[in-house]
Image: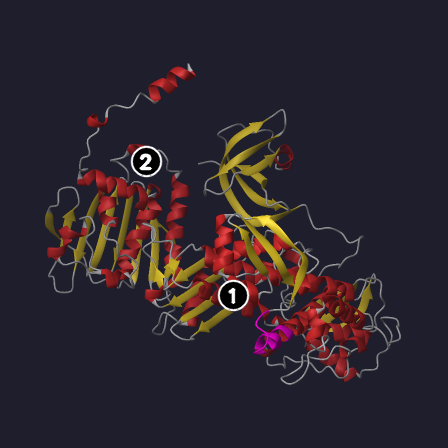
Amino acid sequence: MALKWLAMSHPHPSPQGDRAIKELPDTLISQIAAGEVVERPASVVRELVDNALDAGASTITVRLLGGGVRLISVEDDGQGIPQTQLPLALKRHATSKIADLNDLESVQTMGFRGEALAAINSVAEVSILSRTLQDTHAWLLDGGTGELSAGARQVGTTVTVHELFFATPARRKFLKTDATELAHCIEAVRRHALARPWVTFAIWHDGKLVEQWRPPATGDFAPDDDAATLQRMADILGDNFKTQSVPVDFEIAAGDVGLRVRGRAGLPDHARARADQQFAYVNGRFVRDKVITHAARSAYEDVLHGHRQPIYVLYIDIAPNRVDVNVHPTKIEVRFRDSGAVHQAVAKGVLQALSKPRAGALNAAEGTPSEPPMAATQPPFLASNPPLATSGQNPLPWRNTDSYINPGRASAAAINELSHLWGGSTPQAPGAATASGPATRDAEVDQPLGRAIAQIHGIYILAQNAHGLVIVDMHAAHERIVYERLKKQLDAVQTAVHAGDAVKSMPSQPLLIPASFAATPTEIATAQSHAETLQLLGLGIDALSARSLAVRAVPTTLAKGDPVALARSVLGELAQHDASTVITRAQNELLGTMACHGAVRANRQLTLPEMDGLLRQMEVTERAPRPDRPAFDRDRGPRGDDRGGFRGGDRDSAPRGPQRESTGERANGTVKFFNDMKGFGFVQRDDGGEDVFVHISALERSGMGQVTQGDRLAFDIEIDRRGKYSATNLGPLSE
């Protein structure tokens, strides 16, 4: 039977003469184009809102019926379309936004292809009602017949799309439920609203207002108005986003590269299980770009736990002629002329924002000094690590370049110094009297981490601040302090090494026996084209043949690692992003190990001055966990794998985190299948997300006996350590 079907499905090809080349009709051409441009109702909404923004609209209203399948209407108060140009609006490749190749290479509008309206008109019933300032009344264009008639409306344009995919019913079968399609339409408008806080957006569905975003009540707003932008972010992403994020503002103005990255980056302890709140814009256009995503993720590598996804809204302002937006019909992908500069700007901008000591920023906001008075409370171990050397001084613990070149000596020096961190102080009971006066101790209550009052189980520091009690893991806190200090010292050494005219690369160690490996053509081409970059990184990679490479030298700090794995990783990143973070990650792992071994261990009795000094240093340490968030312990608790968080260090007896944690999401879905014998199944989400696992125990806890295929459920979503989603708190959904 199967063979018979194959024979019927794949008949013998007919002679070439029976398949003559011929021109396709315009309608079919537009329908083919619609397959790329119009994927679902959200695609239509995006294209029409693009046109409204290009027309200078300040108010845009989107009206939907049946999730956008039955009706999509986009109203704006823009400049309108003249009567004589209305028939051209529905023709293929007709646009007012570009005229020649120079305009195409420096596009400054959201739309420019001139094919969206024609594609939509080929798969739906379209009408355009528009009026300009010079017209006495509006004009209505019927997309099916091309007939023009008089109409009534204010200055602006209304594009109405009825019965999407009526002309291609097969496409309509692939659409999801009305709720899912509505969610995608709302998301499309959200993306526009985040980048334009001065524009009012409203979304109506089935006669009900579902979303509305207005600009602030007073003032004139420019595209870079930080206050208006922040308010729009709060309106869309929630009021907590203001306190759960830090501002990003980084600019490169060297040579002819004009590049600025601004926006907000979410704090690591507010990361999400899904990457559904990551917004990147290039000249106001929402994009999905691997360079930007990789750069943002690399900035979070040192502070983000496991599979957690950061939250950010980034606006990249770049010269239009340095970015190509004519890459994909949906205009959601771009190509940069200098992707390395964009990667560097995004990574550095986000990294600098996250590196600022948040406790110090809190103090500055409250009018208190960010640098606490350390003279009275600084313990001996903190005094033994002096600050970074200024120009003309040698940074510590590496007294010279040779200590950096020899990783064994550098590690030994650091660990030997750290081994005496607690020397010179006589342990005393945590509750004993301190040498500091009562005035100093009382003043510390106003600090974000407060004043130490006791040590709990030899692991935690119990402190009191103006808002209540704070519990700090002393090993994790000290590890973060030492780790950030070592990173600064290493950066200072590398800066000094690179500044010398005689030194053109990082210190490297030649291999006694070169490590050869079979390489792909891409790896060989990358090694040849990025030879100078590899030399700067301390990597010596040469071609042995047309199919193999040899690693002849590696950075000294990574001499004990796998040279082949390192070379492949670096070449892979250079080929994709023109920038390598592998070396940095490996160095940070080395420094993290040094900091862990040098940090104070569990069950070490500390004096109150030592605990206070540790808290004061924690407050001014870069990337330290936020101490002023009251909901820290209540919401999600500590991140066990985040270096320098409030965790138990390397104790074997430390309790592990929960097997699953809530994502904070409530979703609806349909049971895809459920095996009563095995007691598990999967639910397909209405929002198009990944299928969610459901276990019989979750049903029993929710008071439900069993479910069958096709049942509608509402549920909360949890994620486990492997990044897998499961349903909990289930309930039947009546629709």
23 on left or right of 538: left
Residue range highlighted in magenta: 493-505
Residue at 11%, 46% in the rendered image? 147
Residue at 42%, 75% in the rendered image? 253
Residue at 34%, 22% in the rendered image? 10
Q: Which mark is residue 171?
A: 2
Q: Which callout, 2 or 1, points at the residue further toward the start of the chain?
A: 2
State the SS at label 2.
Answer: helix
**Residue 666 horizontal/vertical position (percent):** 53, 46
Q: Quadrant of the N terminus?
A: top left
For badge 2, the amino acid type reads: Arg
699 on left or right of 279: right
Q: Residues within 10 Å of mark 2 (few under 14, many from 20)?
A: some
Above or below, comparing residue 395 to residue 347 in the picture: below
Decide which of 44, 398 is in the foreground and name it: 398
| Residue 25 is covered by the magenta coloring | no
Q: Quadrant of the C terminus?
A: top left
Separation of marks 2 and 1 at Cα, in angstroms: 51 Å
- Select label 2 or label 1 by which is in front: 1
Query: Image quarter for residue 704?
Result: top right
**Residue 53 horizontal/vertical position (percent):** 29, 60
Is residue 28 something one can see in this rendering? yes
Query: Image quarter for residue 15?
Result: top left
State the SS at label 1.
Answer: helix
The answer to whether mark 2 and mark 1 are in CB contact below 8 A is no
| Residue 502 is covered by the magenta coloring | yes
For badge 1, the amino acid type reads: Glu
The residue where tag 1 is placed is 532
